[in-house]
Image: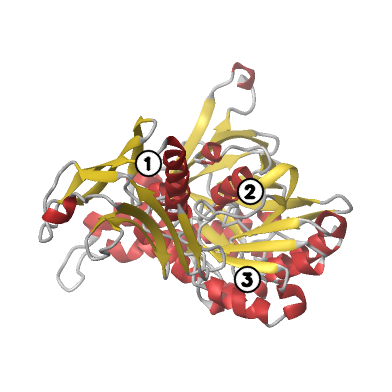
Amino acid sequence: MEVSAGQKQNKHQQFALASITDLYPSSPSSSLASPVVARFSADNGVEELRFLHESDAADFINVDLSTAQLFKLGPDRSVCIYEGSASDISKEKYSRGITIQFRNEEESRAFHCAFEQWKKEVIVQGITLPNGAVTDHKSKFDNKIEASSAKMYFHYYGQLLHQQNMLQDYVRTGTYYAAVIENRADFFGRVVVDVGAGSGILSLFAAQAGAKHVYAVEASEMAEYARRLIAGNPSLGERITVIKGKVEEVELPEKADILISEPMGTLLVNERMLESYVIARDRFLLPNGKMFPTVGRMHMAPFSDEYLFIEIANKALFWQQQNYYGVDLTPLYGSAFQGYFSQPVVDAFDPRLLVAPAIFHVIDFTEIKEEELYEIDIPLKFIASVGTRVHGLACWFDVLFNGSTVQRWLTTAPGAPTTHWYQLRCVLSQPLYVMAGQEITGRLRMVAHNAQSYTIYLTLSAKMWGPGAEQGGILQTSSCKLDLKEPYYRMSQPQAYAMAQDQQPHQLIHAQDVHIQSEDLEEPELIQPPSQNLEAQL
């Protein structure tokens, strides 16, 4: 066996064989007489296995390592099955096979070990860690995520302007910095993996905290910008290696003592990066290693916002025109109305709009299995603190950095300093009336889809109130289906949502301008007209 190793871009490994025989000879070169060599090579990032004459390199058989499989037929005899064309001009692929006769059993074992190692490099990484090249092999990420969605996702995060938007979220960036620097003991002298490193800012924070080495894994083109940023900070950059690739695919030379990442999307789970964070934990984190962040919580509470409801309902009024250039648009009004209510609303709102204390659902990143994030089912139960009309469910999240020295929370709650995540509200097309002290129950079910987001199914119900309520029963129920991938971004800049009594008349949408005539808006018998105070303001 001969092994030659050049630069990292060019690597070769060669084995002498007794003979090979093509199981499907399609040309005179398909079977090679002795002496024969098998040569693994990676030239400029392209890996291949080639069988050729030792004296005539022009006579060879190429094997695609990404499709190849190797089986033992005996101690010194094996068969290699791979995918290839029936002829040089044929585009259709067929299974091909080559029987390999080794000179002895020891060389057979060595070839099998080399084959598995080269094939592993083809599948998970390409050729070298710094370059992070990845082949076309479909990883777990590719199998569950639509290609067009992944392309748009990595294109978005490959642009500096979007990285700047996140970096300028000083609540986000400042909290990460504080969590790392205040917990230097967790980072000093440790190996760190930055999952979805983006610009590399968290890797630089970890290096500032004294990390022994940081592996910054980034799949988008932002990896190149991260390299430049890190190279521009040489005192820190000498301990950081940027690896371009997905965490589901790359290989690292050592295990990590701590993972750091910013995997949170809208409502914590949008973009489905939490799954990649969990996969990185399973692949790279040492037992008892730490994760920053450690735990996430999704908070939920019913809210009342008459003006938001009217604003959304108003959007569909366009479709009530009966003479739009001679065309009656009303047949599509009902669908348009429901379409607008299928968009979660992303904005910052005043916490005084909440009508009951919030509940929360915990996701422990150190324990949860990836598959448990495919569907999230949360039972809801609230006690209304005021009598009002409930327009839907408000949601936000926070995450905990459970450091050895300091525990620090990053929150997106209403009333707290606004972040680029804002808050999220699911608005019901049919609101519910509740009295103070009345119980509100329901369910929030979130099902992951291959566009890197979730379909949300929300049901809220108001239980009977007054005499006979102890017999149970439901008086009103309202449901909606929303796509977290397609939210309504209501505000482009952070701002508090003013209470109705604080608003000026010119800010309001007049209720008398909303003419909703749809079976979808039939209100339950319990619903009463708005209060006189509200009517006066409207």
Which mark's residue is nearer the viewer, 3 or 1? 1
Q: Earlier in the sequence, mark 1 or mark 2?
A: 1
Residue 166 badge: 3
Callout 3 secondary element: helix
Q: CA distance from mark 3 to mark 1?
A: 60 Å
The picture places residue 83, in percent across and down from the top left corner, at: 24, 48
Residue type indicated by callout 1: Arg
Q: Label 1: few (<14), some or many (≥20) within 10 Å?
A: some
Callout 2 secondary element: helix
Q: Earlier in the sequence, mark 3 or mark 1?
A: 1
What residue sits right under mark 2 in the picture? Answer: 284
What residue sits right under mark 1 in the picture? Answer: 103
Query: Taking 346 as reference, is 361 left or right?
Result: right
Residue 443 badge: none
Callout 1 secondary element: loop
The picture places residue 299, in percent across and down from the top left corner, at: 66, 46
